Amino acid sequence: MGARPVILVEEARREHCHKCDVRQKSVCRAIDDAGLAKLSAAAVIVDVKKGETFMMEGDPAIDFFNVTHGTVKLFKLMHDGRQQVVGFAGAGYLLGLAVSKAYASSAIAIEPVRMCRFSRTKLRTLMDDFPRLEALLLEIACDELAAAQEQMLLLGRKSAQERLASFLVSWGAITNPCAHGDRVALPMTRGEIADYLGLTIETVSRTFSKFKAEKRIQTLSNDEVILLDRAWLENLAEGAMASPSLA
Amino acid sequence: MGARPVILVEEARREHCHKCDVRQKSVCRAIDDAGLAKLSAAAVIVDVKKGETFMMEGDPAIDFFNVTHGTVKLFKLMHDGRQQVVGFAGAGYLLGLAVSKAYASSAIAIEPVRMCRFSRTKLRTLMDDFPRLEALLLEIACDELAAAQEQMLLLGRKSAQERLASFLVSWGAITNPCAHGDRVALPMTRGEIADYLGLTIETVSRTFSKFKAEKRIQTLSNDEVILLDRAWLENLAEGAMASPSLA
DNA sequence: CGGCGCGTTGAAATCACTCAAGGCACGTGG
DNA sequence: CCACGTGCCTTGAGTGATTTCAACGCGCCG
């Protein structure tokens, strides 16, 4: 519940958006080349160190953040310390949407993170200048809502194995958007995966071990796995093997 | 998985939006009195009988629906029949937001329901005519996202008792927006509550019985309860009584 | 009257949790 | 270079909250 240690790397300069390599993956794609100067002027580049919390649930929602490097964990806490991770945000992800007046969740960097920060008012100005931006924000919010509903299904109705399989497949798809790279990086800890899937760390670990023993995955290290049998994992994730399972 | 038996009651007429008693609670409040004729022209009033499914997960998202009377259940299904209810929608609620191209969830009327139907294209036209509408849609989507994250916390980390307490309090707040009416109508069955809370019907029933025995609630019938001890329920919902509980 | 949908309650089973011990990798300091 | 501490992960054993299985009650309706 401390301060928000956002470190300013450089004041916004014209042109930094031109070289941005995640623009086409992010909200910023709503703004054409001609508008990049305005975009650059509105965005402030910010670095956050691993382990730093830069957004607190309940705080007034002043800023939006667009992740350009690294991974962020979005989470909610209960009074007694129980934690629910509501999402992991990698490059191209926009933070701060779940908002009425206050942030709906907290955010912490689980790797060194670089982001573009937009104040609410500057974002409003940008939306007035570029109507496509507002439309794209709506589209993004709707997609997130759909993802949230998928996660509700996972949390409410799936078994531990189905949850981990779902996570590996969908996180793999997010981080390897094109091409079926079966190597998946896991910057988060087992405990964070557990808090995302509504399980305990021990159950997550045991399920990893089970998948390994069954040759469904291979672990290169604690934070990198290879999906050896993606089709099997996808079927499991969808609940296709509920009763007549193949051990 | 059948057809979509939407029954058309009357063709859209000018003026029907003028008399609408849920306008101020719904998206339609973005449109001022001067624009009501256009709104009326875009909306088609539709009645759906109890038990009819009028939106299917995965179907192309052609229409949006604004509920004016009755209650709708939004849900997702797994191949083996497991169901997760992702929300209940009463008067004023907009359906169809969780959308990229296809609906993210199915919708069924659990009471006789009346709605205004907007085609995607007509909604687009309305948004162009009334920019406030697009802004309000974004706001609504963000609020829903925040609610979805709250539900993730419930599903991932709360006990059965905490889940039911959360549900009673929040559903009560939705249906009795102003004033602390402690009488809460429950148009959904125990099974539907269970599928919303990620529990079984038996656990829901047992937890109702426990709350009754402890005089936290009183049941007038299966579909109407009185919250006798709202403060206690709210505390429980937040997890404030995790260890040092008062039986 | 009988059937059906819905809800309640009891008893037994189970999946995931809790508690506990130990391993491994990494960094720090002697 | 090695001892040590720490954080993270793994594994085992026992427990427990919730589920599963089963029976029953109740109201409604044909």
Image: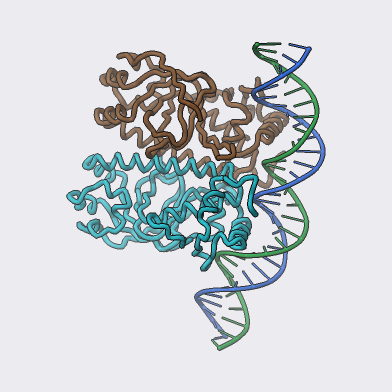
Chain colours: A cyan, B brown, C blue, D green
Q: Residue at x 46, y 56 (%)?
A: A172
Q: Is residue A220 above or below residue C5?
A: below
Q: Quadrant of residue B139?
A: top left
Q: Residue at x 26, y 19 (%)?
A: B34
Decide if residue B15 is on the left or right side of residue D26.
left
Q: Residue furthest left?
A: A34
Q: Is residue B116 above or below residue A92?
A: above
Q: Residue B105: in sight, yes or no? A: yes
Q: Position of residue A104 (x, y in %)?
A: 45, 44
Q: Is residue A136 above or below residue A234?
A: above
Decide if residue A38 is on the left or right side of residue B123.
left
Decide if residue A137 is on the left or right side of residue B169.
left
Q: Residue A51: in sight, yes or no? A: no
Q: Position of residue B45 (x, y in %)?
A: 39, 18
B168 or B156: nearer the eye? B156
Quadrant (top left/top right/bottom left/bottom right) for the C terminus of chain A: bottom right
In this figure, what is the number of numbered marks?
0
Q: Is residue B3 above or below residue B145?
A: above
Q: Position of residue D27 (x, y in %)?
A: 69, 15
A194 or B9: nearer the eye? B9
Q: Quadrant of residue B169?
A: top right
Q: Position of residue C11 (x, y in %)?
A: 82, 38
B224 or A11: nearer the eye? B224
